[in-house]
Amino acid sequence: MAKTSSFDVSTGVDLQEVDNAINQARKEVAQRYDFKGTNCTLQFERSAASVTLEADDTYRLQALGQVLREKLSRRKVPLKNLDESKIEEGSLGRARQTIGFKQGIDQETGKKISKDIRGGDFKKVQVQIQGDELRVIAPSKDTLQEVMAFLRTQDYGVELAFGNYR
């Protein structure tokens, strides 16, 4: 029996780093001159993996979102995994937006990645979809390295992470 090598393709966000970034963003908003006297809030829901931004108007909401994205990028949270909803206008001109964090590869993206790998002329490469991640199997580690390099050049709307390389 031939020995095979494999690696897993997944995506995710470290929710503790998100929590730290939100705390930093709250501190900056409390100190910034353009937010003085306003009622702008950031609420993090760990169980739903989302954050709700609320501000006095759309302009301040966009500025609040920019502060949050800056803090997330400094904490090495991939911004590709943000799932931003539409800005909702509320009563008295207040604006609200929910930003979700993508955890795991969804079925459509998994099928697209699998199709791209199979269509990439790699020798004896197999792809298995296992829930919210993919396992790529090949007899040669060099082939797996080529697949990783190929996937890094593609854009699937999420930050891909490679792990469990054997």
Image (cartoon, rainbow, N blue to C red):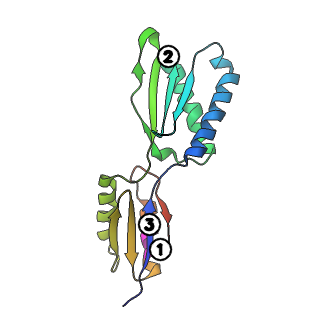
Residue drawn 46% across the image and 57% down it: 160
Tell me the residue that label 1 is attached to.
145
Of labels 2 and 3, the one closer to you: 3
- Residue under pointer 2: 57
Label 3 Cα neighbours within 10 Å, binned few <14 / some 14-19 / many ≥20: many
Image-based side of 140 in relation to 68, left or right: left
Residue 148 lies in the magenta-colored region: yes
- Does residue 130 appear to the left or right of 27 in the view shown? left
Between the residue at mark 3 and the residue at mark 1, the CA separation in whole angstroms equals 12 Å
Assign a secondary structure to mark 3.
strand
N-terminal of the pair, mark 3 or mark 1, is 3
> In x, y percent, where is residue 45?
50, 35
* Residue farthest top in this picture: 92
Q: Residue furthest bottom?
A: 1
Amino acid carrying mark 3 in the image: Asp
Indicate whether 164 appears above or below 158.
below
The stretch of residues the image draws in magenta is: 144-150
Q: Residue 54 at x, y = what percent? A: 51, 22
* Residue 71 visible here: no
Residue 85, picture quadrant? top left
* Relative to 58, residue 148 above or below: below
Residue 98 appears in the rendering: yes
Quarter placement of the N terminus: bottom left
**What's the distance in space between the residues labelled 2 and 1, CA to CA?**
49 Å
